[in-house]
Image (cartoon, rainbow, N blue to C red):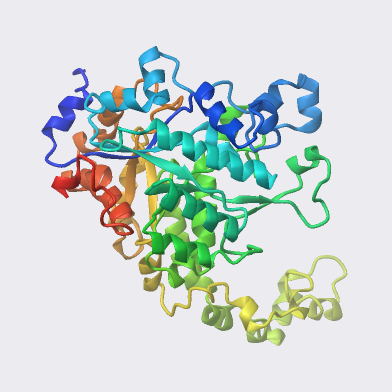
């Protein structure tokens, strides 16, 4: 087996830049604490993040039996690179990360928070908003002098549209950020349970993904993002809800969790008509890969074909049923025990009660918010708006570039994200070599690889803001 080429060697062979759309910085806590204290926040992170989905210290502070009794979701033991001090330092200190960019074969990286993303799910308004502001001020200063190669991302809380717009304006207009991240969802406490025992909130919450069923109208936020020329990254974990609540096995919780949260948001925005109303909105769903996106896109097309209003009227309306014929067949083939004619005629539908509750057409039309007349229109309301963050070692990244597998020969806009700074990148300099393996194996073409590591990320940002890469090393080449 031949030795793997270094990232710098790979980059030297390419005739195009490499954009890393999802790197991470590990906040250097002694520095971040100063910014938190400036906004009056206690820096005991164990207490600050207690009750946040995936919170770590909370689980470890309980006995094994207490964890079982409360069915507490197990978090990871550690999530930062510890193999060598050089990589941990690169994750922690932007100036050092910038000095190693050529080693990583990368021209420009978009760099997201790590621990700071937990501020999104703090329920107390002052702590949530103050924490995000402190985090953003810290990153503004930490990345000073590095923005020709590293573009930091501001964290924008979105518990209400008003909060989101105010913090977005502050981050972009006051602090000068061009890239932002919003939570993939907001935790909502059911009416009547506000202020109750915090332990109850481990179970008594639901997830608001902005579109379908949201109690708020987020259209002003989408409008403001477009107005400011901002594409929206999303990056919230799926641990701690749904099927990812194991109290004993974190790997069980972790596998697929970003895909689950990304699918929820993508589906909610699409079916909520957001992409129909805001065709210029660009949203990146990060770290979940593209396999779930291929499935969701295909399922949306299939469901529209079978569950649009006309299809329901033509195939599923109980008034279509020939009751006499069904009764005759039921009497002949379905009778078990002392079935009588009256019982057969009283149970013509297999779902009890449904024949008595026909909803009005507006409730039957699940696609009313997107207002389409053909399945082909789904492609044009899905592909331009959503971009899918893919880590280098995911073999399913190639699905994005196999249009014959997908309805209407769609190519999904997958974007390369290194995820450097986190546990799944034990050696930062290996990432580009992993990303290029599908090309080396002949699974994708050079054009596909170019789209993956460069063009799709370029589109994601410059379709919102043509000047996004001004002042970077890419300015002269794009």
Quarter holding the N terminus is top left
Q: Is residue 317 left or right of residue 102?
A: right
- Rendered position, 7 above or below 303: above
Residue 423 horizontal/vertical position (percent):
46, 24
Q: Which is more toward the observer, 48 or 289?
A: 48
Residue 343 horizontal/vertical position (percent):
84, 76
Q: Which is more toward the observer, 121 or 313?
A: 121
- Rendered position, 80 above or below 259: above
| Residue found farthest to the right | 338
Q: Is residue 148 left or right of residue 367?
A: left
Q: Which is more toward the observer, 415 or 357?
A: 415
Residue 325 horizontal/vertical position (percent):
68, 84
Q: Residue at x 81, y 47 (%)?
A: 195
Kindly indicate the quadrant of the structure image that contains residue 466.
bottom left
| Residue found farthest to the top | 84
Q: Residue at x 52, y 66 (%)?
A: 220
- State whether residue 304 appears in this view: yes
Q: Residue at x 72, y 49 (%)?
A: 205
Kindly indicate the quadrant of the structure image that contains residue 247.
top right
Q: Residue at x 42, y 53 (%)?
A: 173
Residue 160 horizontal/vertical position (percent):
62, 57
Kindly indicate the quadrant of the structure image that contains residue 393.
top left
- Rendered position, 378 above or below 147: below
Q: Is residue 427 left or right of residue 129?
A: left
- How many numbered discs sit on the rendered protein? 0
- State whether residue 100 appears in this view: no
Q: Is residue 211 left or right of residue 207?
A: left
């Amino acid at each position: 087996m031949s030795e793997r080429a270094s990232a710098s060697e790979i980059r030297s062979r390419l005739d195009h830049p490499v954009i890393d759309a999802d790197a991470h910085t590990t906040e250097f806590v002694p520095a971040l604490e100063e910014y938190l204290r400036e906004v009056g926040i206690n820096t005991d992170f164990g207490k600050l993040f207690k009750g946040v989905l995936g919170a770590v210290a909370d689980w470890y502070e309980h006995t094994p039996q207490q964890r079982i009794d409360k069915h507490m979701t197990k978090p990871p033991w550690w999530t930062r690179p510890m193999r060598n001090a050089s990589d941990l330092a690169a994750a922690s200190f932007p100036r050092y990360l910038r000095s190693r960019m050529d080693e990583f074969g990368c021209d420009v990286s978009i760099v997201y928070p790590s621990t700071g993303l937990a501020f999104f799910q703090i329920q107390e308004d002052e702590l949530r908003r103050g924490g995000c502001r402190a985090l953003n001020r810290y990153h503004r200063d930490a990345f000073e002098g590095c923005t020709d190669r590293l573009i930091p991302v501001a964290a924008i809380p979105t518990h209400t549209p008003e909060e989101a717009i105010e913090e977005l304006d502050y981050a972009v207009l006051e602090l000068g950020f061009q890239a932002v991240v919003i939570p993939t969802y907001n935790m909502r406490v059911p009416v009547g349970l506000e202020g109750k025992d915090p332990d109850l909130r481990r179970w008594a919450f639901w997830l608001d993904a902005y579109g379908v069923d949201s109690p708020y109208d987020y259209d002003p936020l989408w409008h403001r993002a477009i107005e400011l020329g901002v594409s929206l990254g999303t990056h919230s974990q799926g641990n701690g809800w749904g099927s990812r609540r194991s109290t004993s096995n974190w790997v069980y919780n972790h596998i697929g969790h970003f895909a689950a949260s990304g699918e929820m948001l993508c589906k909610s925005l699409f079916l909520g008509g957001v992409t129909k109303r805001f065709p210029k909105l660009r949203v990146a769903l990060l770290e979940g890969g593209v396999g779930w996106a291929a499935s969701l896109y295909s399922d949306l097309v299939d469901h529209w074909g079978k569950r649009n209003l006309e299809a329901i009227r033509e195939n599923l309306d109980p008034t279509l049923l020939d009751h006499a014929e069904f009764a005759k067949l039921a009497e002949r083939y379905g009778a078990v025990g002392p079935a009588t004619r009256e019982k057969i005629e009283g149970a013509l539908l297999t779902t009890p009660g449904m024949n008595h509750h026909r909803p009005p057409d507006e409730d039957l039309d699940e696609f009313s918010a997107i207002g389409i007349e053909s399945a082909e229109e789904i492609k044009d309301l899905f592909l331009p708006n959503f971009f899918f963050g893919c880590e280098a070692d995911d073999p399913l990244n190639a699905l994005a570039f196999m249009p014959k597998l997908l309805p209407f020969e769609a190519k999904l806009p997958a974007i390369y994200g290194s995820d450097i700074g986190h546990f799944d990148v034990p050696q930062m300099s290996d990432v580009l070599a992993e990303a290029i393996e599908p090309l080396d194996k002949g699974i994708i073409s050079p054009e596909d690889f170019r789209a993956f590591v460069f063009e799709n990320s370029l589109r994601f940002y410059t379709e919102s803001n043509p000047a996004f890469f001004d002042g970077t090393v890419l300015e002269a080449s794009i």
